[in-house]
Image (spheres, helix red, strand yellow):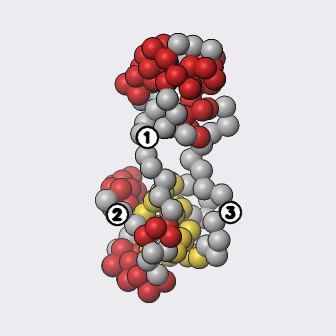
């Protein structure tokens, strides 16, 4: 993807607030609203912009707990790794999944309604999976920062 200075400025603005109007973005970066729309369309089609989502306040859902989970697989074969990736993609409780190097094979960010619900999740997903050698969970006490933005 060949992104110029205007594209990068637009990405910086919309990753902070994707609801900004084309007119507002155009004023901010020095382009017409039409030019902004064309550039955003091109970046969506090329995959530079993968998705645009709403960030929901967990308290609107009655509160949630967040856990950071390290997973070590019993077998590092590509079929086992690929199978685990597919399983994580299918689980709505898994907000983020990273295939990592080091002590853990995967690091997950998991959400649950309660610690009890997370325990049920671990039994269903981790304990019943013969390819998981070990997992460690860390309970988040407070969310200090949540972002998927990149420094531009």
Q: Which residue position is annotated with label 3?
A: 144
Disc with the residue nearer the chain's start (3 vs 2):
2
Q: Which residue position is annotated with label 1?
A: 52
Mark 1 element type: loop
Q: Which residue position is annotated with label 2?
A: 91
Lateral position of residue 144 relative to residue 116, left or right: right
Where does residue 96 sit, x and y in percent of width and height? Answer: 48, 57
Disc with the residue nearer the chain's start (2 vs 1):
1
> Label 1 neighbourhood size at 10 Å, few (<14), some (14-19), many (20+)?
few
Label tally: 3
Mark 2 element type: loop
Disc with the residue nearer the chain's start (1 vs 3):
1
Q: Is residue 101 above or below residue 124?
A: above
Distance from Cα at disc 2 to Cα at disc 1: 20 Å
Residue 9 visible here: yes
> Label 2 neighbourhood size at 10 Å, few (<14), some (14-19), many (20+)?
few
Residue 75 visible here: no
Q: Nearer the viewer, residue 3 or 76?
A: 3
């Amino acid at each position: 993807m060949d992104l110029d200075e205007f594209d990068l400025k637009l990405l910086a603005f919309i990753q902070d607030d994707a609801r900004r109007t084309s007119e507002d973005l155009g004023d901010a970066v020095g382009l017409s609203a039409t030019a902004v729309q064309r550039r955003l369309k091109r970046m969506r089609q090329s995959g530079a912009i993968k998705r645009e989502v709403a960030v929901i306040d967990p308290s609107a859902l009655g509160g949630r707990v967040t856990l950071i989970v390290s997973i070590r697989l019993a077998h590092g074969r590509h079929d086992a790794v690929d199978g685990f990736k597919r399983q994580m993609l299918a689980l709505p409780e898994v907000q983020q999944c990273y295939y990592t190097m080091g002590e853990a094979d995967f690091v997950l960010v998991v959400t649950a309604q309660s610690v009890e619900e997370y325990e049920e999740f671990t039994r269903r997903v981790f304990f019943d999976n013969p390819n998981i050698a070990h997992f460690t969970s860390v309970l988040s006490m407070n969310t200090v920062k949540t972002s998927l933005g990149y420094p531009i």
